[in-house]
Image (cartoon, rainbow, N blue to C red):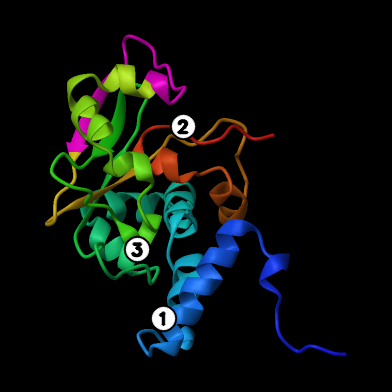
């Protein structure tokens, strides 16, 4: 006997629950599976941290773009076609040897979706939102990032009107690298300020 349908018992428990919920909501006419697929594809391939990583890589590679990003991040980012919800008004802050930037939203969870995708759970958590302002160095150490005592930590409070993108310092030993290769060194956390760019392997 042949079957032309998927078996939920081949899915892990979480995926099976999601499938069951989607089936129920579809049968009730509350959701359109095609619309869900479009949303998922959008977040997986069109927005998210890889977009921000490409912005950073271009800034590392192109001094003119880096200058534009410093002075009008919204326009510079939009020139790469990364725009949309919660990314309408952007400011890029550049890490240096003297200053490390950290982004938080103390009121809720304002976050630049167009370049970083959906915010991580910890970004929305009250302990991060309060302690990042009070004890940023301690918070960074909990993320595994210990900065020199001489490095100033500047905390930026994201709002509904303005969201921030941290441009981490370019790792040494990456001279001559393509933007695509450089982008692989840029993590979401580095663009929030809770990590540094990855060192080249």
Asked whether, in this view, residue 3 is left or right of residue 182, the answer is right
Magenta residue check for 134: no
Q: Which residues are magenta?
A: 141-156
Q: Which mark is residue 114?
A: 3
Q: Element under label 1?
A: helix
Tell me the residue that label 1 is attached to: 25
Q: Quadrant of residue 105?
A: top left
Say which residue appears at 31% left-offset and 10% top-offset: 150
| CA distance for labels 2 and 1 | 42 Å
Of the image marks 2 and 1, the number of the one nearer the N terminus: 1
Q: Earlier in the sequence, mark 3 or mark 2?
A: 3
Residue closest to the far front: 1
- Horizontal and vertical percent for residue 53? 47, 52
Which residue shows up at 24% across the image and 39% down it?
Answer: 104
Q: Quick check: is 154 in the magenta stretch?
A: yes
Residue 48 falls left or right of residue 135: right
Within 10 Å of disc 2 (Cα), the crowding (few <14, some 14-19, many 20+) is: many
């Amino acid at each position: 006997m042949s079957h032309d349908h998927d078996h939920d018992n081949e899915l892990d428990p979480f995926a099976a629950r999601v499938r069951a919920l989607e089936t129920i909501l579809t049968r009730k006419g509350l959701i359109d599976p095609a619309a869900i697929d479009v949303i998922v594809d959008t977040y997986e391939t069109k927005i998210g941290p890889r977009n921000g990583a490409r912005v950073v890589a271009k800034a590392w590679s192109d001094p003119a773009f880096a200058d534009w990003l410093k002075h009008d991040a919204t326009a510079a980012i939009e020139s790469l076609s990364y725009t949309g919800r919660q990314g309408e008004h952007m400011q890029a802050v550049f890490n240096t040897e003297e200053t490390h930037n950290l982004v938080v939203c103390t009121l809720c969870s304002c976050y630049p979706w167009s370049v970083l995708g959906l915010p991580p759970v910890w970004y929305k958590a009250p302990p991060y939102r309060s302690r990042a302002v009070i004890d940023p160095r301690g918070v960074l150490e909990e993320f595994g990032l210990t900065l020199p005592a001489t490095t100033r930590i500047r905390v930026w409070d994201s709002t509904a009107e303005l969201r921030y993108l941290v441009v981490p310092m370019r790792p040494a030993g990456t001279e001559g690298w393509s933007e695509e290769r450089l982008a692989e060194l840029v993590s979401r956390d580095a663009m929030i300020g809770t990590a540094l760019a990855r060192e080249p392997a």
